[in-house]
Image: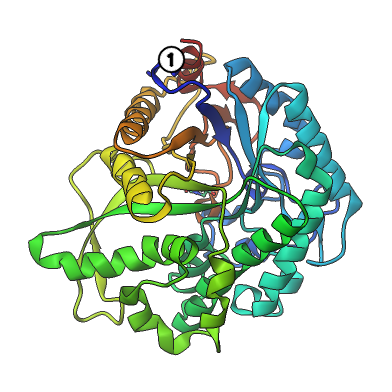
Amino acid sequence: MFKRSTFPEGFTFGAATAAYQIEGQRFGGAGSCHWDTFAATPGNVVGHEDGALACDHYHRWADDLDFLKNGGFDAYRFSTSWARVMPDGVTVNPDGLDFYDRLVDGMVERGLQPYLTLYHWELPSALADRGGWTNRETAERFADFSETVMARLGDRITRTATVNEPWCVSWLSHYVGHHAPGLRDIRAAARSMHHIQLAHGLAVERLRSAGHGDLGVVLNFVDITPLNDDEARAAARADAISNAWFIESIARGTYPADALEGLVAHMPAQWEDDMATISTPIDWLGVNYYTREIVSADPDAPWPGVERHAGPLPKTQMGWEIHSDGLSNILERMARDYVGDLPIFVTENGMAWADDVVDGAVNDEQRVEYTAAHLSAARDAIDRGANLQGFFYWSLLDNFEWAFGYEKRFGLIHVDFDTLVRTPKASYHAFARGLAQ
Ligand code: IFM
């Protein structure tokens, strides 16, 4: 597997989850969120599944935290559901805040550092009704929500991320239509791509002025690979939309020209005035990495006119190529081109596999290998100049994998979704052994 001792002193090892994917949305007075309504609409989620029960982490969180403690992990990356804390998007549900308060106390009691992500996609339906991320007001309300959560939890949080994967919040959800709210509209995409960045910036400004520190953001990256030497233009366009839009605006206060060429006509009025807020300094960067994408131009398709190709490498249950070098490429690029010496954390990396429990055990040797290869790539990135300070496996538990329902299993811990029984997989035990060495 790997050895903790091969990483720098103080390097943080953790595992990550997100609220809607594990908690059980029906408990504790949570309000309707746009994932509830998206999932209730035929054809959106495999098996018509939703997050109503999920892993019932709402009631079983103590056992789940024990897995982290007993495995020797240093930290837990979790998220707060906006719809649980503010069911209508603005009014506080005391039970919601109490739940997260207990959860954070539970981490501290177990010696686990809490890494909070404020928004991992539970947009309250009341705000979705008013246009969700296509409406600038949602960004303002997000800053209010962030301040409320941090006023209650901030004294015990090690690091805070504003938003998880703004590309998923915007492009994947408003242009590809694969995630809530399921739109396929370039104007909605452009607006949401700007407003989610603005939400991040407003929240950082608000939290900073309230005295909070260690503020960052979690961005997802794909290692974009041109199909051949003639496809550099298509690769640049794909990279601008998937990667550069989100990091360049935060690190430099500009959007990449290769993305603006197709989006500028659809941007909200006076968007340039927001760039200073979007690029307000952060304290750390979270990188989520899973795979690469091989691309070429598709001249018959509307902008951005990019076609994706299946690559030759072995694939996970998601059909994603396993390409660990992509992780070191991305980490090195972040340090070199965007954030310099700023601390970087791999906030998600992991693989889905169709795991089964056999005689009380799950022998997921593919995941053991995947994780070892990516940890080795993370270690290489440190030698290549990235100030990488931690690595979080995605995910602690098998969970609700969004539009794929419960079929895709990413966890170190297997969850039987009929009985909710948890079974640590071989990868969990391998991780624990590596952490002890
Ligand atoms: O499950 C998701 C997570 O919510 C965000 N990052 C990618 C994971 C795997 O698809």
Mark 1: which amino acid?
Answer: Ser
Which residue is rendered at x = 82% and y = 50% of the image? 151
Which residue is rendered at x = 44% and y = 53% of the image? 220
- The correct choice, above or below, for 389 with respect to 143 in the image is above
- Towards the viewer: 244 or 21: 244
Helix, strand or loop under label 1: helix
Asked if residue 255 lies left or right of residue 117, the reply is: left
Residue 386 point in image, percent of width and height: 37, 40
The answer to whether residue 371 shows anywhere in this view is yes
Question: Callout 1: 10 Å neighbours few (<14), some, many (20+)?
Answer: few
> Which residue is tagged 1?
5
Which residue is rendered at x = 62% and y = 25% of the image? 422
Residue 144 point in image, percent of width and height: 77, 64
Quadrant where the N terminus lies? top left
Residue 43 point in image, percent of width and height: 52, 65
- The correct choice, above or below, for 65 with respect to 266 in the image is above
In the picture as drawn, the residue positioned furthest to the top comes out as 437
Name the image quarter holding residue 45.
bottom right
The colour scheme used here is: rainbow
- Towards the viewer: 96 or 407: 96
Residue 44 point in image, percent of width and height: 53, 63
The answer to whether residue 59 shows anywhere in this view is no
Asked if residue 119 lies left or right of residue 170, the reply is: right
Asked if residue 389 lies left or right of residue 303, the reply is: right
In the picture as drawn, the residue positioned furthest to the right comes out as 94
- Towards the viewer: 217 or 222: 217
Which residue is rendered at x = 67% and y = 26% of the image? 112
